[in-house]
Structures are given as C-alpha cells and as structure tokens.
Image: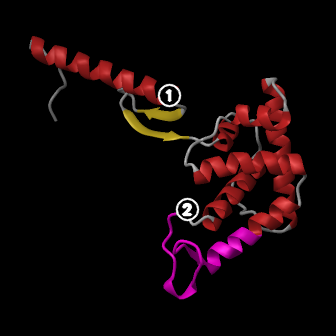
Amino acid sequence: MGKHTKPTDPQEIARRRAERAANEAEISRLRAQGAVVRLDRARRIVTAYRASPFVKLRDSNTISAAQARAAEALTEDWAIWRGLDGKPERLDVHVTSRKGGEVVTDRMLKAGERVQMILSRIGPLDRELLVALVSGIVEQDVAPPWREAVEQITGVTQSVRQSQMVVSALENLARVYRSHGRMRQTA
C-alpha cells in the first residue's frame, strides 16, 4: 500500500475541503433531527439512525437493562400486532378482515392479545404514556419527542421528573413481563 500524502493540486485540495464541509453539514443535519450518528476516525458517517426514547434512556443509563428489555418486548409485540415487523407471514395462517382487504394473521392476533394483557396489568397513567411512546415508534416510524409526550399526558414539565415518569412506567412494565415470564434474558 502506498503512503497517504496530502494533495498538492489546488483543485484536489478544494474538492476535499468541500467534501469535508458537506459531510459536517450532513452530520449536523442528522443530529438536529434527533438521529444517532456514528462516525469513524476520519469523521465519516458509519451509521445514522433515529433512536427510540428507550434506546436514548438506556444509553444514558437512565433505565436498567430489565426496563430496556421490557420496552423492547412491548415494541416488538406492538409491531407484530400491527403487522409492521417486516417479517413475511406464513400463508396458512391468514384470516382476511372485512374492511379494505386487510390481512390479519393468527400471529398478529396473538401479539395483540399479549399487548392488551400486558397493558391491562399496569396503571392507567403508565399505560397511556407507554402507548403514546410505543405507537409513535412503531406506527409512525419516528422517535416521538418523549418529553413532550410525558408533559402532555402527565403535566410534568421538569426534565428530571419526566425521566422519572418514564422510568416508573418501564419498571412497572418490566415487573409485569417478569411475572408472566415473557421477557428475554439477554444482557
């Protein structure tokens, strides 16, 4: 492999500067939209994704691993229930609904039953908060502005207390999952 040297051609220097400036602008744009942007050592974008509020809270060590697993389990079941998990269905389990040619599968129905059962075992405030966050993540494919959701549902405006509300809801969710043996045992 050859040695990397700085270009001496003025056009090449200008091109690289423009490339770096465009890359920095893209990084700023993505982060301003709430994306998590991972860079390599040369500050090139490796990955960029919109993290859910649960990922952000887990990454900041605001919620425990068990609370994060409970949020993942609810989100996964919600996606299956709504037919938005991206997995192809087996043809032998289809049941056609009466409205608009919509296909509902046994797998979707079972996931919906799990979601309803789990949500029925937590308090109404926690349920409303989790429904708002999970439905935004799954159905609208956006990470909802979770602090706004907490404020709208609970009336809490202080950021620390908003985090505590979500932590409390997730702890109650984790307890329900633990009592029903549904949570995956991953670290």
In the picture, measured across the screen, residue 174 lies left or right of residue 149, that is: right
**Residue under the image location 72 percent in, 46 percent down:** 132
Residue carrying label 2: 84
Tell me residue 61's x, y (percent): 72, 36
Category of crowding for the residue at label 2, using alpha-carbon neighbours closer than 10 angstroms: few (below 14), some (14–19), many (at least 20):
some
Query: Closer to the camera: disc 2 or disc 1?
Result: 2
- Please determine whether, in this image, residue 17 is positioned above or below residue 59: above
**Residue under the image location 48 percent in, 33 percent down:** 37
Which quarter of the image is occupied by the N terminus?
A: top left
Residue carrying label 1: 31
Q: Are marks 2 and 1 in contact (CB under 8 Å)?
A: no
Direction front: furthest residue: 99
**Residue under the image location 64 percent in, 42 percent down:** 55
In the picture, measured across the screen, residue 13 lies left or right of residue 133, that is: left
Residue 160 seen from this side: yes
Q: Which residues are magenta?
A: 86-113
Q: Which residue is more in the foreground, 64 or 129?
A: 129
Type of the residue with mark 2: Leu
In the picture, measured across the screen, residue 24 lies left or right of residue 183, that is: left
> Is residue 100 within the magenta segment?
yes
- Please determine whether, in this image, residue 9 is positioned above or below residue 60: above
Count the marks: 2
Dot placed on the residue nearer the N-terminal end, 2 or 1: 1
Category of crowding for the residue at label 1, using alpha-carbon neighbours closer than 10 angstroms: few (below 14), some (14–19), many (at least 20):
some
Q: Which residue is more in the foreground, 77 or 153?
A: 153
Direction bottom: furthest residue: 92
Type of the residue with mark 1: Arg
